[in-house]
């Protein structure tokens, strides 16, 4: 049997399958379908210093093999998360990664302090949300700003810090190198790709915010390419994501250089997607005769 | 607790030129958990990533029936299902109607009519006095009226062009009911001579619901409405199905709804 355990910047995951921020709430809903302890880690819904109601609906549009969303970081705020959600999550044997978004470097720092003290296993700094006006994406597209936020987050945290990159840039390796240089312990990618859909009858965009972020199988090849580029540019471990819906997809991400893989949008079609992907990945690894699943990481043989 | 399951189509019939009814063999577990006003999230073929939310019209020990009209590719695919085909169904989902009142007016407009049958049946089975006000575009869109007639004390039908029932909008029937309805309850002692106040439960286009909510508010009558919003997960995890509440907060149609107290809802566009 292949050993499924992987290490993500010192955080020991029992298997490489993670659920990404925003697609899994705080675990309560999908916890009705399977034991959350089956997962390697849970990235919780993006947190902000204060509660946010998010954007007006419609917040979702279907696309060819994908979806656009414009939720806009709706969340109860970091304090409510620590008081009400974290204790529930802690009842399960699964690593908890707190995903955070701020408007200023100080906001990121303040949240890192609180979450470190509350005992999350890792902090994922989201500098790539396409659905909020201030901060968010702005930090993710400028190397010096990305580095500044990373530095503050590192300084304010006692747990490993992972920085989540935006695909909405010309050269993602520039940002990756900047955050690694600023001390990031790990990098996750990709967040959603900016997109738009229009109802041709009403001539209105389907999303109330006009544009949103694309996820699901449609983004998979873009995400695999970016993971591969980043893996070749930095040494820190990578959490790869974008369109994974079966075991072979997860294997692709690992071959491209990911240490672990997140399964998000796929859950909307199949509530059991993360555990199914894990089982399919394990079966693939078995067939390949791997002793450890981690042998896959970066094992692509480029031409 | 919802169930995700591959179900067999036990019956596929057309209720009229526009509406399709599928009876799904969902098994005891899913059927037993169903209450009126809930919905199922149905996968409509491999090419479409998202499931489609469809209200549960009626159910029995092991089956659920859904009724839908073709709106786009997903519902078109669904309309081509035949007896024996398999469907990937997630449900029952959401919070439905509370049919515990003594006297209930169910109000349905167009494709909002089918879910009200489940409410009417559940309320009647619980001993309530149930009345139905149903609005259709025209005779060709009429459906399920025989089944409503079976479980309701009274049923009025109205249509946009007068080809079935009177000509007009269903909100007129609601107005009249609230204004005129005599106390037909056999036992009036419980309400000290005053008519038992009805509770209105409605499903239909947003504009219709808004008008029904307004009429109920004017008469001081409780009103429950079933809302629609575009959905992702259907279970409350992705937060895409937000709807605006009167107090400025946002709730989620799939988990907090689809049925809300009309007073809670922000009716401004
Ligand atoms: C709680 C709930 C209960 C419903 N019950 C019924 C029912 O009993 N009978 C019935 O005929 N219809 C019902 N609807 C509407 C039904 O979900 C849509 O008609 C259907 O999703 C359209 O899919 P499509 O692929 O044919 O259309 P498309 O326009 O191609 O769909 C594209 C995307 O938009 C979404 N979408 C489009 N219209 C709606 C809508 N009105 N509400 C929500 N999502 C929409 C689709 O789900 C899909 O994700 C219900 C909707 C909700 C939210
Ligand atoms: C509805 C929705 C909400 C999301 N919210 C967040 C968020 O709050 N923070 C974040 O970093 N990423 C968020 N994402 C991005 C995902 O975490 C992930 O990066 C992306 O969806 C790609 O993976 P997938 O194709 O497997 O879904 C969200 C994605 C979706 C679909
Ligand atoms: S559809 Fe995902 S929260 Fe309602």
Image (spheres, coloured by chain):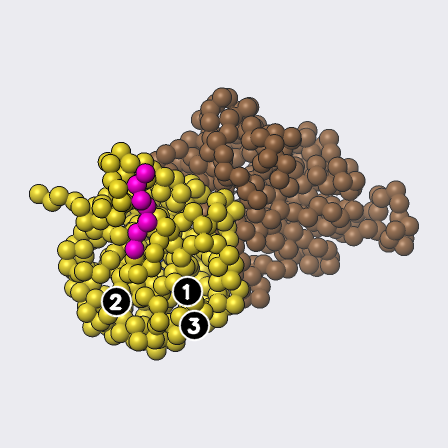
Chain colours: A yellow, B brown
Instruction: Say whether residue B106 is visible.
Output: yes
Quarter occupied by residue A193: bottom left
Quarter occupied by residue A149: bottom left
Q: Nearer the viewer, mark 3 or mark 2?
A: 3
Residue in view at x 49 percent, y 49 percent: A31
The N terminus of chain A lies in quadrant: top left
Q: Residues within 10 Å of mark 1 (few under 14, many from 20)?
A: many
Which residue matches tag 2? A184
Residue B249 picture location, percent across and down? 53, 64
Residue B90 picture location, percent across and down? 50, 39
Which residue matches tag 3? A117
The magenta-colored residue range is: A1-7
Which residue matches tag 1? A120
The C terminus of chain A lies in quadrant: top left
Instruction: Say whether residue A132 is visible.
Output: no
Earlier residue among tags 2 and 1:
1
Measure the C-alpha gap from mark 2 to mark 1: 17 Å
Chain bearing tag 3 is A
As drawn, B29 above or below B242? above
């Amino acid at each position: 049997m292949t050993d499924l355990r992987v290490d993500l910047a010192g955080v020991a995951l029992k298997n490489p399958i993670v659920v990404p921020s925003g697609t899994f709430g705080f675990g309560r809903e999908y916890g009705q379908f399977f034991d959350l302890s089956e997962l390697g880690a849970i990235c919780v819904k993006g947190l902000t210093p204060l509660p946010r109601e998010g954007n007006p609906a419609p917040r979702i549009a279907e696309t060819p093999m994908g979806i656009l969303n414009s939720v806009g970081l709706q969340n109860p705020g970091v304090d409510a998360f620590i008081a009400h959600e974290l204790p529930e999550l802690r009842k399960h044997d699964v690593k908890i990664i707190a995903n955070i978004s701020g408007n200023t470097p100080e906001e990121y720092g303040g949240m890192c302090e609180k979450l470190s003290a509350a005992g999350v296993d890792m902090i994922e700094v989201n500098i790539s949300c396409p659905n909020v006006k201030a901060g968010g994406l702005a930090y993710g597209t400028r190397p010096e700003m990305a580095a500044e936020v990373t530095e503050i987050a590192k300084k304010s945290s006692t747990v490993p810090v992972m920085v989540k990159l935006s695909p909405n840039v010309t050269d993602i390796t520039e940002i990756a190198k900047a955050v690694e240089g600023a001390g990031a312990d790990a990098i996750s990618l990709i967040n959603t790709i900016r997109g738009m859909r229009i109802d041709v009858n009403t001539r209105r965009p389907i999303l109330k915010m006009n544009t949103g972020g694309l996820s699901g199988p449609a983004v998979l090849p873009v995400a695999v390419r970016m993971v591969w580029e980043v893996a070749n540019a930095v040494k820190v471990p990578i959490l790869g994501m974008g369109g994974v819906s079966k075991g072979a997809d997860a294997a692709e991400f690992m071959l491209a250089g990911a240490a672990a893989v997140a399964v998000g949008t796929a859950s909307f079609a199949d509530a059991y997607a993360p555990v199914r992907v894990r089982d399919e990945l394990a079966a693939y690894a078995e067939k390949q005769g791997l002793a450890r699943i981690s042998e896959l990481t970066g094992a692509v043989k480029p031409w | 607790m919802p169930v995700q399951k591959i179900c067999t189509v036990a019956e596929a019939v057309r209720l009229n030129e526009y509406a399709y009814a599928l009876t799904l063999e969902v098994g005891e577990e899913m059927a037993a958990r169903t209450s009126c006003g809930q919905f199922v999230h149905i996968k409509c073929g491999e090419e479409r990533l998202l499931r489609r939310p469809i209200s549960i019209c009626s159910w029995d020990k092991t089956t659920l029936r859904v009724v839908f009209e073709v709106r786009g590719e997903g519902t078109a695919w669904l309309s081509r299902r035949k007896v024996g085909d398999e469907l990937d169904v997630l449900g029952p989902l959401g919070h439905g109607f509370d049919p515990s009142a003594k006297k209930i007016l169910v109000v349905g407009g167009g494709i909002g009519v089918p879910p009200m049958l489940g409410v009417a049946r559940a309320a009647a089975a619980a001993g309530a006095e149930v009345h139905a006000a149903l609005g259709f575009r025209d005779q060709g869109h009429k459906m399920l009226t025989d089944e409503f007639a079976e479980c309701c004390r009274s049923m009025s039908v109205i249509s946009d062009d007068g080809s079935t029932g009177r000509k007009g909008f269903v909100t007129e029937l609601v107005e009249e009911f609230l204004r005129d309805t005599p106390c037909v309850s056999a036992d009036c002692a419980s309400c000290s001579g005053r008519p038992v106040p009805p509770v209105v439960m409605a499903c239909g286009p947003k504009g219709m619901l808004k008008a029904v909510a307004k009429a109920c508010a004017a008469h001081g009558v409780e009103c429950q409405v079933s809302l629609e919003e575009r959905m992702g997960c259907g279970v409350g995890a992705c937060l895409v199905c937000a709807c605006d509440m009167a107090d400025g907060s946002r709730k989620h149609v799939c988990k907090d709804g689809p049925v809300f107290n009309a007073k809670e809802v922000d009716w401004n566009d």
